[in-house]
Amino acid sequence: KKQSSQSNVIMNHELAMAGITAPYGSAARALVHVKDLELKEMIFGAFEKIFSEGPREARAAALFQFAYLMNLDQDRAFDLFSSSVNSEVDIDVLVSGLWSFGYMGNYKFDALKPAYSKMAVSNELGDQDSHSLFIQLYGAYLHNESAAQNLLYMLLDNNRHSCAGAVN
C-alpha cells in the first residue's frame, strides 16, 4: 500500500515512538545510556534478544539512539548495530535508526553499506528521512568513504525527496 511522503515521515516516527512508549522500548532507551562495565554483558544480551526476537516497534526503539552504546564498548556496539541493520528487512525499522547511522557511519562506514543500500533504493522514505540520509551519504562522500559515491548516486536516482533536498 503506497502512502504519501508525509504519511511515511509520520509513520516512521510513530514506529519508533510506539516502541519507546512500550515497556521494552523504555528499557532500551534507558539501557543505551548505561556506562557501567559490570552491566555490559546484560545490556548487550538484552539488545541481542530485541534484535533477534523483538517486534518491529522494539527493534525500532532499540535502533533509535543505539549509538550511545558506543560509550560502553565501541567495537561490540558497532558489531551488533551493523549485524542488526544489515540483516533488517523492515525499512521503517531501519529508518528509525537514522540518528544512530550518523554516528555508526562515522565509525566504519563501509560495514553499513548493505543497510544504506536498502534505504537508498527505498521508495518509502519521506522528506525528512530522505534528507537525513542524503546528508549522511554526502558527508561520507566528502570524507572519501569508498562506498559513499555509489550509495549517494543510488539515493539520488531512486528518491525524489533526496534530489529536492539537495538543491533546495
Image (tube, rainbow, N blue to C red):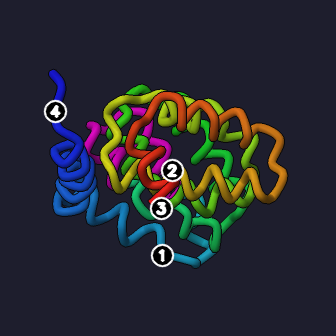
Residue nearest the viewer, comparing 127 with 53: 127
The kind of residue on which mark 2 rests is Leu
Q: Overall secondary structure of the magenta stretch? A: helix
Mark 3 vs 2, N-terminal side: 3
On residue 99, the disc is 3
Residue at 39% across / 54% down in the picture? 62
The kind of residue on which mark 3 rests is Trp
Residue at 43% across / 40% down in the picture? 51
| Nearest-to-viewer mark from 4 and 1 | 4
Q: CA distance from mark 3 to mark 2?
A: 10 Å
Q: CA distance from mark 3 to mark 4?
A: 23 Å
Q: Are marks 3 and 4 in contact (CB under 8 Å)?
A: no
Residue nearest the viewer, comparing 44 with 51: 51
Q: CA distance from mark 2 to mark 1?
A: 25 Å
Q: Residues within 10 Å of mark 2 (few under 14, many from 20)?
A: many
Residue at 54% across / 36% down in the picture? 155
Q: Are marks 4 and 2 in contact (CB under 8 Å)?
A: no
Mark 4 vs 1, N-terminal side: 4
Asked which secondary structure carries label 2, the reply is helix
Mark 2 vs 1, N-terminal side: 1
Q: Which residue is mark 4?
A: 3
Q: Which residue is mark 2?
A: 133
Q: Are marks 4 and 1 in contact (CB under 8 Å)?
A: no
